[in-house]
Image (cartoon, rainbow, N blue to C red):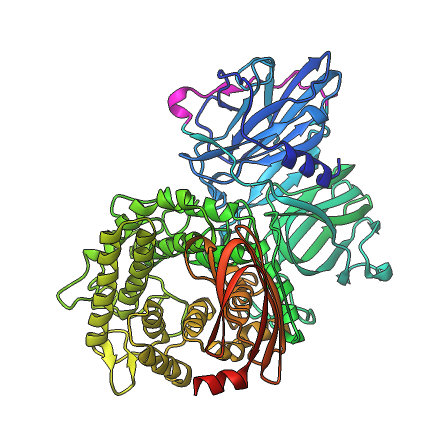
Amino acid sequence: MNYLIWFALFYVCIACNTGNYDVTAVWVSPTKDTHRAYGVFMFRNTFDLALVPSDLKLDISADNRYKFFVNGALVAEGPARGDLDHWYYETVNIAPFLQEGKNTLAVQVVNFGKNKQLAQISNRTGLWVRAPEDYPNLYTGNDNWRVKENVAFEDIPFGPILHSKYYVCGPGDMLNMDSFPYEWTATVFDDSGWQPPFKIDGPNAKWQLVPRDIPMMAERNEPVTKVVRSSGLPSIPNKTLKSLTIPPRTKASILLDNGSLTVGYPNLTYSGGKDSEIKLTYAESLFEDQDKKGNRNDIKGKVILGYYDQVRPDGKNFRYEPLWWRTFRYVQLDITTGASPLTIERLTNRFHAYPVTFDYSFKTSDEVYGPFISVAERTLQLCMGETFYDCPYYEQLQYIGDTRVQALINLYTSRDDRLVRKAIRQFYHTLSGNGLTNSRHPASVRQVIPGFTLYWITMLYDYHMLRDDPGFVEQYLPATDSILGYFTDFIDESGMLGNLHWGDTVGGGLPEYWYFTDWSKGFKRGIPEGVYDNRSSVITLHYANTLKQASLLHADFGSEETSARYRDLSEKLTKATMTQCFSKEKGLIAQTPEKDSFAEHPNILAILTENLPFDQQKAMMRKILDDTSLIKSSMYFRFYLFEALKKLGMDDEIPPLLDFWHQSLEKGLTTFPEKEGDTRSDCHGWNASPLYFFLSSFAGIEPIGPGFKKISVSPRFNELKEIVVEVPHPNGMIKVDLAKNEGVVNGTVELPEGSEGVFTWEGSNLSLQSGINQIKLNKLKINESLN
């Protein structure tokens, strides 16, 4: 069945439960023991229907992952990734897939074992299906279900290959088709030799089930056909992979270029080829050596390095799809045939990512920004799935520091904010007794970055400003107090944060609490100076900035006393840092009171607190931009540099600082990478940030108060002659259509119903009302009036 069809049907059907459901459904396991090892398991339930119902919803979940088939058609995948205390189930209407007479439910359950994705939390292998009380033979725990392990699969761990690049996205597949049970999902299949699954008793069923709170992933079929290099074969017609036959006793290699980075489930359709072996290697880019990539479009002299799957055909026709989704631009097929020829029919990709809808638009007269848009959008979407990801190839982990930036972009570009709310909830669930959250979640290995916990408050603040959802935000205010309270304990007699302890050490003597700030050259492991054995201006000012945001949050909910306390503490921390670390000679804040090391970061954070006189902030920013001796921000922290420029009205300094993004395009990248140079990851969500700045800085659209009820429109044309923008708003769309010509700005600003705003340009302010507002301002006349 076409994936688009089943996805559409599922999307329509997914909903909270309605009707009466059988409460006797239990978790079942393929084996009696506590099964945590690698394994692929096939569950089947065959039953008869005299009449096909118009509606039949089942709830389903599994550990680790499942694919759910009804009469051979794939109808759902899951569960959405969570943790044991918040384990998701999906609700599926299977009625469209049923028929009169015999029907079969088939569920493939995979446990990736010890080499599972780091983002995968697990209890043990298990399946859970709940059915309406009118269909008691469908729920797990009744006698209809049968199970057997699919022994055709083995896992391929990638630690020795990719561990140096910190790869934690699970194993590859080794599939031996001699043992594969063809058509096991179909109705006509003999499962009489299969065993009934074992019921998992209450205490061992540690999954706390909750309904899925995000939509199913977007699905589309992408052909992967362009052959850019081959060996061991005659020339390939039209350089296209289609019905290509590899002769017996041949070793062949075929390199395909998808043209752009993508994610999903590759589907390789082949026939024949008994005793052959097919290896599929996936890579974001090719390598000149182990680390050097160069231009991503160039292939000459380069090799492919990456994770892979292997299939051993048995001579029959088959369409192979891996157990977990892959990330790739390049795919290499390395084929060894036996005594029989092998025909590769086609290779396609079942695209699989969050169904983000980009509701915004950004048009300017300057074509240089056009390529930024599509590349930034692809970067963001490939880092959105069942959670936000830092990167889709190497980690697939939701880190707070990355997610705060990605969520802000999401809020500016899409009306769909479900993944943002889910991220806020999931990090909140990790809040520990000392007030810190985990830095990444879901993750089976705990990691704490205290600065990332502060960014959780910032993410909550962003949501509060851009969405009118006070009930959602207010429930988390006590958590902000817990987090801020943790740092208060480290304020020493100087008034700064001092001697922030390591926390407990973990394997290899590494700190449990990692004060990562930025991947700047000059920071060790991303950590600024003075954190553990001195006083750190960076961490102190980050805390001060977060206190300011928490103060505004509490004020909006009537907690005036708490708001004032946080505001006062923010100002005191900034003043103490200036007293201890400000160098009059350099006009900048040093990293520590010794004033022997200077970085951009504390100065950017001091500006963002807005606790210093405005003229001092501008002078500090001028130093940041001009002093080449400073430890510079990497691409990640350049986001906060741009935020500081925006606050100071120095947005004209942003375009020259977009060199990294320009260079990425010149290097043939189709997504924005993790950092400058020979980066590990070619796709990193935090570097989709130009999308946000085009809208918030160039178009100048920002909330003035909570819920986006009052809107600031302050366009910074720089060298642009026109700005035509639409930005999603809780009540509709904000539309800006402006042109600048010889010092005159002319056009319209349209605000949604129930909102108001202020238009600011060249020091002149105009009140905006909901509906269409005509704008016409003359710079010369403004200057005359000011003089």
Which quadrant holds residue 718?
bottom right
- Answer with the quarter of the image where residue 374 lies: bottom right
The N terminus: image quadrant: top right
Residue 359 % position (x, y): 61, 55
Instruction: Identify which residue, 776 or 403, lies in the foreground.
Output: 776
Give the residue at x 36% y 64%.
517
Is 203 one of the magenta-colored residues? yes
Is residue 70 placed above or below 330 in the rendered structure?
Answer: above
Q: Nearer the viewer, residue 766 or 382?
A: 766
The magenta stretch is 187-205
Label total for image: 0
Residue 778 in the figure: left or right of residue 500: right
Q: Residue at x 29, y 84 (%)?
A: 587
- Seen in the picture, residue 377 relative to 67 is either above or below; the reply is below
Of residues 381 and 326, the one drawn nearer to the viewer in this rendering: 381
Query: Residue 425: image x %, image y %?
Result: 41, 43
| Magenta-colored stretch includes residue 292 | no
- Answer whether residue 772 is visible to the viewer in this image: yes
Residue that extends furthest to the front in the rendered view of this protein: 785
Q: Is residue 16 left or right of residue 152?
A: left
Residue 675 can be seen, yes or no: no
Q: Is residue 35 left or right of residue 719?
A: left
Specify the quadrant of the image occupied by residue 426: top left
In the rendered image, the vertical position of residue 54 relative to residue 742, given as above or below: above
Q: Main secondary structure of the magenta part?
A: loop
Could you tell me which quadrant the C terminus lies in? bottom left
Query: Where does residue 536 sit, x and y in percent of width and height?
Result: 25, 68
Tell which residue pokes out farthest to the left in this image.
493
Camera-nearest residue between 11 and 727: 727
Please provide percent x and percent y for residue 740.
61, 78
